[in-house]
Image (spheres, helix red, strand yellow):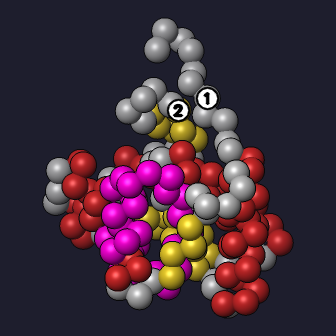
């Protein structure tokens, strides 16, 4: 990296869409627990948005679901050289299967945990990817998937 930090810029339009849906879930569906991840860009934007909402809705809980223990470090680098700084969370969950699996499988196990323990998922899937497949699996299990890719970003 030669002394340079790669800084990821949040997608502000997408964060507004996330905020609108998260507030709707709090006010209309009585959602109090938000399971969040922090690996991908969308996950980071969603996580930061829920933290912002927590200022106005202090009763909600932010629960970080991790795929590996290193995600709890206050500062970490991801594969593409981005530096992440630890965010606040009320609690964290480390699914059992994540502790025993290959790094790439751990993300799959983490996503399965989220699908199996959620009533709603806010997603952004422009393309048919692994995340898209998990959202489809969530729908098959009766989880309501709120897809933001079709909205104006």
Specify few, some or many for label 2: CA neighbours under 10 Å numbering under 14, 14-19, or 20 or more.
some
Which residues fall within the magenta stretch? Answer: 111-137
| 125 w.r.t. 61: above or below | above
Q: Which mark is residue 7?
A: 1
Write down the quadrant of residue 108 in the picture: bottom left
Mark sitting earlier along the chain (1/2): 1
State the residue in front, 97 or 12.
12
Q: Position of residue 55 (x, y in %)?
A: 80, 67
Q: Position of residue 46 (x, y in %)?
A: 61, 58
Residue drawn at 74 percent across, 47 percent down: 12
Helix, strand or loop at label 2? It is strand
State the residue in front, 144 or 33.
144
State the residue in front, 83 or 11.
11
Q: Position of residue 131 (x, y in %)?
A: 39, 58
Task: Tell me the residue that label 2 is attached to.
Answer: 83
Q: Position of residue 40 (x, y in %)?
A: 48, 47
Check the image and name the residue furthest to the top. 2
Q: Which mark is residue 129?
A: none
Residue drawn at 68 percent across, 73 percent down: 22
Residue 21 falls left or right of residue 143: right
Residue drawn at 58 percent across, 58 percent down: 149
Are discs 1 and 2 less than 8 Å apart at CB?
Answer: yes
Residue drawn at 54 percent across, 12 percent down: 3
| 135 w.r.t. 73: above or below | below
| 24 w.r.t. 151: above or below | below
Residue 58 falls left or right of residue 122: right
Specify few, some or many for label 1: CA neighbours under 10 Å numbering under 14, 14-19, or 20 or more.
few
User: CA separation, marks 1 and 2?
Assistant: 7 Å
Q: Nearer the viewer, mark 1 or mark 2?
A: 1
State the residue in front, 102 or 133.
133
| 54 w.r.t. 139: above or below | above
């Amino acid at each position: 990296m030669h002394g340079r930090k790669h800084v990821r810029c949040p997608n502000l339009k997408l964060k507004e869409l996330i905020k609108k849906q998260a507030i709707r879930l709090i006010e209309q569906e009585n959602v109090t627990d938000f399971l969040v991840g922090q690996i991908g860009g969308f996950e980071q934007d969603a996580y930061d948005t829920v933290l912002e909402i927590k200022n106005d809705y202090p009763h909600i809980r932010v629960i970080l679901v991790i795929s590996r223990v290193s995600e709890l470090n206050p500062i970490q680098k991801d594969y593409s050289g981005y530096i992440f700084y630890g965010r606040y969370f009320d609690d964290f969950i480390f699914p059992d299967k994540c502790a025993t699996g290959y790094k790439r499988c751990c993300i799959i196990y983490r996503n399965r945990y989220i699908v199996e323990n959620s009533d709603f998922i806010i997603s952004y899937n422009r393309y048919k990817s692994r995340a898209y497949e998990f959202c489809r699996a969530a729908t098959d299990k009766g989880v309501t998937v709120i897809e933001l890719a079709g909205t104006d970003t």
